[in-house]
Amino acid sequence: MSSHSDSVAALRFFGEDLEPDEITRILGRAPTRSGRMGDTHTSPSSGQVRVESFGSWILDATPTQPIDLDAQVAELFGSLVKDADVWAALSQKYHPDLFCGAFFDAGGGGIDLTPRTMKLLGDRGVAFACCIYCNTQDESIKANQEPAAPSTPETRD
């Protein structure tokens, strides 16, 4: 039986007073999507409307098949500012994380990060958040890959 796996990844920033344009200016790259606290968002799949409880800035990596998180991290961070002081300031003011969605269609599986990738995330104060999905038949989960932001960013410290 052959096993199929793929992944999505995104660099995300959250904060009550987050202004997406500020993050864009600092990092030198526009997000894939963003929002301010109080903005409304309509889910394309369900039509449900929700009010953003805090600001967000999200940059998606190109999905990979098979899973290659190291390549996705290199893609994301390769196009952003490298100054450690800038990252320290951002991680103090906001709540950055690298979200990963790993999809397996037979027998489950796992994910790996090299020490180099883990160091890159740690040096920048970026947490790692991962959801693993097994035997996913519903393609809308992948297509609508909008993982929920942490309910209270303060719990991420």
Image: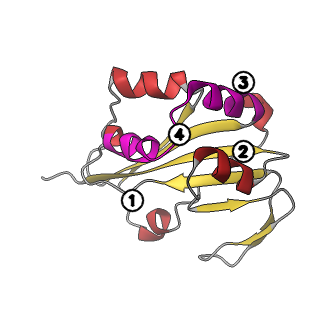
Disc on the earlier residue, 2 or 4 = 2
Which one is closest to the eye, mark 1 or mark 4? Answer: 4
- Amino acid type for the residue under numbered disc 4: Val
Kindly check if marks 1 and 2 are in contact, taking CB atoms under 8 A apart as contact. Answer: no
Residue at 64 percent across and 53 percent down: it is 24
Crowding near pointer 2: few (<14 within 10 Å), some, many (20+)? many
Which one is closest to the eye, mark 1 or mark 2? Answer: 2
Residue under numbered circle 3: 157
Kindly check if marks 1 and 3 are in contact, taking CB atoms under 8 A apart as contact. Answer: no
Could you tell me residue 123's position as x and y percent? Answer: 53, 22
Q: How many marks?
A: 4
Residue under numbered circle 2: 14
Quote the CA–CA distance across marks 1 and 4: 36 Å
**Label 3 element class:** loop
In front of the other: 120 or 106: 120
Quote the CA–CA distance across marks 2 and 4: 18 Å
Residue range corresponding to the magenta coloring: 71-93
Q: Is residue 39 left or right of residue 137?
A: right
Q: Find the residue positioned furthest to the left.
A: 1
Residue under numbered circle 1: 136
Q: Is residue 76 magenta?
A: yes
Could you tell me residue 7's position as x and y percent? Answer: 37, 51
Image mark for residue 81: 4
In front of the other: 15 or 19: 19
Disc on the earlier residue, 1 or 4 = 4
- Amino acid type for the residue under numbered disc 3: Asp
**Label 1 element class:** loop
Kindly check if marks 2 and 4 are in contact, taking CB atoms under 8 A apart as contact. Answer: no
**Label 4 element class:** loop
